[in-house]
Image: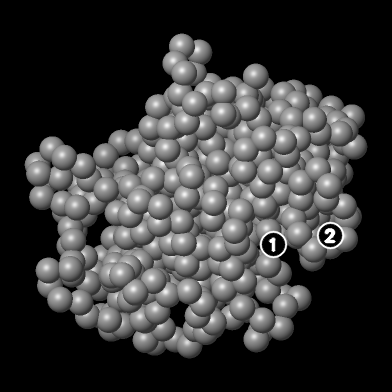
Amino acid sequence: MSSSEHKNHQRTYFRSDFTKGQTLVFDEQALADDFDNAAAKYYEGNKDLSKLLADFRNVTYLDLAVLINFTALFLRRRENNQETFIGISKNKRVRDFIRVWRFPEAFFEATATRFETILVQDDQHYRGEKQDTYTGVGSGIEALEFDSEWTNGSQTKRNFFEFTSFNLVREQAESFSTIPRGEGSRWNKVLIRQVLTTHLDGDNQSDEVARVVIYESLSNAVRHPNATIIQTVSKFDWHEKPDELTSSRSEKPSVSTTGRSLRGHLRIYIWDDGESIVDTLLPTVRVGGPLRGVKLPNYMYDSIHLDIRDAANKRMSLLRVSQMEDPPPDASEELILLCSLFPGVTRSLRRLVQPVQPFDTVTPDAAPIELADKQGMGLYALTRTALDLYQGSLLIRSGNHRLVMEVAHDSYRVQHNVTYKAKITRYPESFPKFRGNLLGIMLPIRMVAREDVTTNINDD
């Protein structure tokens, strides 16, 4: 059944039409690993997989990555002629967030299925309501989040950070090469640069977000085999204490009830529906073929503390991995995924890849990031920028795995003799592989006065 035929045959349901085993239920916050863990349990404990409801009714904070994961799961289940539905939050701020970030439009772009056709009947009355959470009045971030003067047909976005879709089927092949530079240039405009300089840690290196984080992540996505769509989305999130990109329960951005200041993170996500990172490298690894397009001096390679766990968070393996070493032919998929971030690692030594236009701006003192234009150096440069320059974190959701990587600080670095630490979660074989690749970058925001943040906290 084609996607267009499927959307026409998919009927709508009430919540009561789903059993407890057919429903993914979330509490006040829904984080990316909450979604994956709930979905993994659904697949392990269910014999009838014909329908599924992801119910966000009680959610007051919804991570952007959850929306992407939902889309990816919808596509994967549709391949198996299985129906997937969604229930949205009773919380008006969350519904406004979904609307202002234009998720329904992004969902349609990715699936050719109208969002209202997968919305449970109980929530259909929310359709058409006006948002009132975002006004565009206030700080630079607020102005970027919502342009109150925007109208249909405008050349600019209503929300700078909203979902942006690049349809690789509609686009001509020669246009693919312009996507990374075009999106990087958008992040290099005056207002967003001023906001990044004001709010990001990292010695005011605001241009590196556009030149490395955005450009390199999209360059990577464009080159994934069999990708038909790429989507980007981002958000400034605020919370009381510094957190990690681990999707842990403490990650929820919230307002302090006792303190007078807030910290936060800029979250940037890039998703494509192409071949998984591991699958692109696996054939070369298994035959012991060449993986490196660039060879660095030995002193430039770092070591990583790798913690591999199952979906129940039970440790499966603990390794110290050097970026200098190529994975052996019998390497685990976890090791292959990690090595995709190593300097010089590329599949393009054995396969043709889509070329991309270079980013216009070059910063002469950005070593070793200036190596990003060399073969296999893009993801390495991205990792170095997010982790070392901004002291942020990196997420990859691909295949059966979730990878989270950050700098190893202080005693941890000394104890294990490593520069970075990475955690990879391996999901069970019963849980279908993630459709495509999701790359997430979280960059810390400088502490700000509580009264300076008013509208971009997704909570009551």
Q: How many marks are shown on the rendered structure?
A: 2
Q: Where is residue 200 in the image (x, y as percent from the top left)?
A: 44, 46
Q: Mark 1 falls on what kind of element?
A: strand
Looking at the image, is mark 2 or mark 1 earlier in the sequence? 2
Q: Is residue 322 left or right of residue 104?
A: left
Residue under numbered circle 2:
154
Eyeballing the image, is 12 above or below 294?
above
Kindly identify the residue that appears in the image at 15 percent across and 51 percent down: 418
Eyeballing the image, is 131 above or below 434?
above
Eyeballing the image, is 213 above or below 175?
above
Q: Position of residue 287 (x, y in %)?
A: 29, 81
- The amino acid on which the numbered mark 2 sits, given as a three-letter code, is Ser
The N terminus lies in quadrant: bottom right
Viewer-nearest of discs 2 and 1: 2
- The amino acid on which the numbered mark 1 sits, given as a three-letter code, is Ser
Label 2 to label 1, Cα distance in Å?
A: 17 Å
Q: Mark 2 falls on what kind of element?
A: loop
Q: Position of residue 213 (x, y in %)?
A: 46, 61
Q: In this view, does 64 lie to the left or right of 400?
A: right
Kindly identify the residue that appears in the image at 66 percent across and 81 percent down: 175
Kindly identify the residue that appears in the image at 46 percent across and 18 percent down: 260
Kindly identify the residue that appears in the image at 48 percent across and 43 percent down: 199
Residue under numbered circle 1:
165
Q: Where is residue 391 in the image (x, y as percent from the top left)?
A: 33, 47
